[in-house]
Each structure stands twice: as C-alpha cells, then as structure tokens.
Image (spheres, helix red, strand yellow):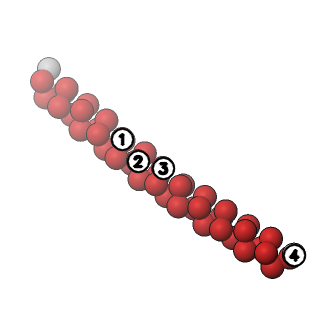
Amino acid sequence: MDELEDKIQLVVQEQIHGLKFLNEMLKQAFKRGVEQIKEWKQGNE
C-alpha cells in the first residue's frame, strides 16, 4: 500500500509542477500581449 501511495504522491507532485509551469507561461504571455496592445494603441494615436 505504501508503494502505491508513494507513486500517487509523485504523480500528483509532477502534475502540480506542470500546472505551475503552465501558469507562469500564461502569465508571461499575457504580459507580453498587454504590452503589445499598449504599443499598438500608442502607434495608432
């Protein structure tokens, strides 16, 4: 039973790590998108 629990915990930790990584990527992409919109607006004024 302990071996199974260890495997489950490992998988859960990997999933959490993957989600944190994805979240960080999305935040950075969003920031870049906002900056590009600001630049585009300034260019069109």
Residue 45 numbered tag: 4
Quarter of the picture holding the C terminus: bottom right
Please provide percent x and percent y for residue 34: 67, 62
Q: Residue at x 86, y 76 (%)?
A: 44
- Which amino acid, mark 3? Asn
Residue pointed to by mark 1: 16
Q: Is residue 26 above or below residue 45?
A: above
Q: CA distance from mark 2 to mark 1?
A: 6 Å
- Which amino acid, mark 1? Ile
Answer whether labels 2 and 3 touch (C-beta < 8 Å). Answer: yes
Q: Residue at x 73, y 67 (%)?
A: 37
Crowd tier of the residue under label 3, counting other residues whose Cα lies within 10 Å: few below 14, some 14–19, many 20 or above: few
Q: Which element is circle 4 on? A: loop
Task: Please tell me whether mark 3 or mark 1 is closer to you in this view.
Answer: 3
Camera-side residue of 3 and 31: 31
| Residue at the limit of the structure toward the right, as seen here | 45
Instruction: Answer with the quarter of the image where residue 15 lies.
Output: top left
Q: Is residue 3 above or below residue 25?
A: above
Task: Decide if residue 44 is on the left or right side of residue 27.
Answer: right
| Residue at the limit of the structure toward the top, as seen here | 1
Q: CA distance from mark 3 to mark 1?
A: 10 Å
Camera-side residue of 16 and 32: 32
Residue pointed to by mark 2: 20
Residue pointed to by mark 3: 23
